[in-house]
Every structure is written in structure tokens, then in C-alpha cells.
Amino acid sequence: LNLDGIECSGGEFSREVDVGGDDGAKELTINFVDSDGASATPQVINFTKDTAPPILKENSFKLNDQVDLSRTNNNHIKISLEGSDNSKITHYCLKNLESDPSNDSDCFKEIALDQISGEKKSQKLNFHYRLGLASTTYTIYAWLKDEAGNISTQSETDQKDKQVISYY
């Protein structure tokens, strides 16, 4: 097999291919031809190119179903967020520190199907989060990650990707 000058004699091989163009649905056709010129049936691979990070919707970050909840006596709170993306949002991250998480950070939790409502491009998420045990004020920062591994950008905007709550 010759793939742009790369020889392969059995087994597996990989090759990076620049698909170029804008984000969206793409189709890649692979033609296999052996050294004698015989060819196999072309293989077609459909995929989505996605280089844009998810976006958290303004005023969608709610604690216990309220946009502005400044105090609680329960350290186990309900969180809801809404995000949009070119592909499927697959993970969320909540932290009490504003430093951006890495793609493989353990703060990212997979979004279960029962936590999602809405279309693929706009998803409403609902889950629970445990504050610390100390009676104090907590600042919670939120990030979303899509199936391509893109992470939302932290804007530190109240009710978008940041919330402050006092636990007493």
C-alpha cells in the first residue's frame, strides 16, 4: 500500500490528513491499491470537524433553580447550565478555582443522558454539586467540553460560568 509515498505491508497504519475548510460535516474516501494495481472497494468515512469550543449561555448557570441564589443551608446543591456547540457537549467541570482545566483534568465529569435535555447543538444540563463542609462563601466556576475535546473559555461572568454562594 502506498499512501502519499508511505509504504505499508500489512498490519495497521495511521496518517494525519488535513481536511481543511470550515467546521462541519466531512467525508473522507480512502482508495486501496496494491502493488499490482488491483483496488479494493473505496472506504468512506463520515465525521464532523469541530475546532470551536462550547459556549455557556448567559444567565443559564443556576443554583437550586434560581439565577441569583446567594445563600443556602445545604451544601449539596442542584446546578443547571445551558451550553451550545457545533457538536455534542460530553463533559462538564465545576471548580472553586478559576484556573482553566486541562483536557484530561479529573474535574471533567461525563454527562449522563439523564442530565441532558435539548438538541445536540444546545444542551441544558442538570446535576448536583457538593460545596465544602466549612460555613463560608464559595465561588463556583464552570466549563464545558465537547466530543472533539474543545473546552469552553472562562469569562468569569456571573450567572454564565461563575456563581457565588454562601453556605451557612
Image: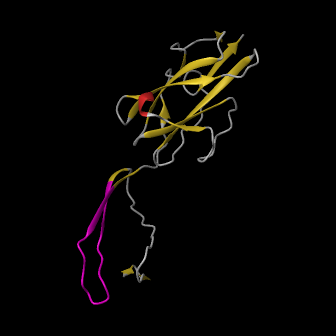
Say which residue appears at 32% left-offset and 88% top-offset.
35
- Camera-side residue of 166 and 67: 166
Say which residue appears at 42% left-offset and 49% top-offset.
50
Write the start and end of the magenta stretch as one range: 26-46
> Image quadrant of residue 31?
bottom left
Rendered location of residue 61, percent (x, y): 53, 22
Q: Is residue 78 left or right of residue 2?
A: right
- Camera-side residue of 90 and 19: 90
Q: Is residue 76 left or right of residue 132?
A: left
Rendered location of residue 79, percent (x, y): 54, 22
On-image quarter of the N terminus:
bottom left
Say which residue appears at 34% left-offset and 32% top-offset.
119
- Camera-side residue of 103 and 55: 103
Rendered location of residue 127, percent (x, y): 52, 25
Say which residue appears at 31% left-offset and 84% top-offset.
34
Residue 34 is one of the magenta-drawn residues? yes
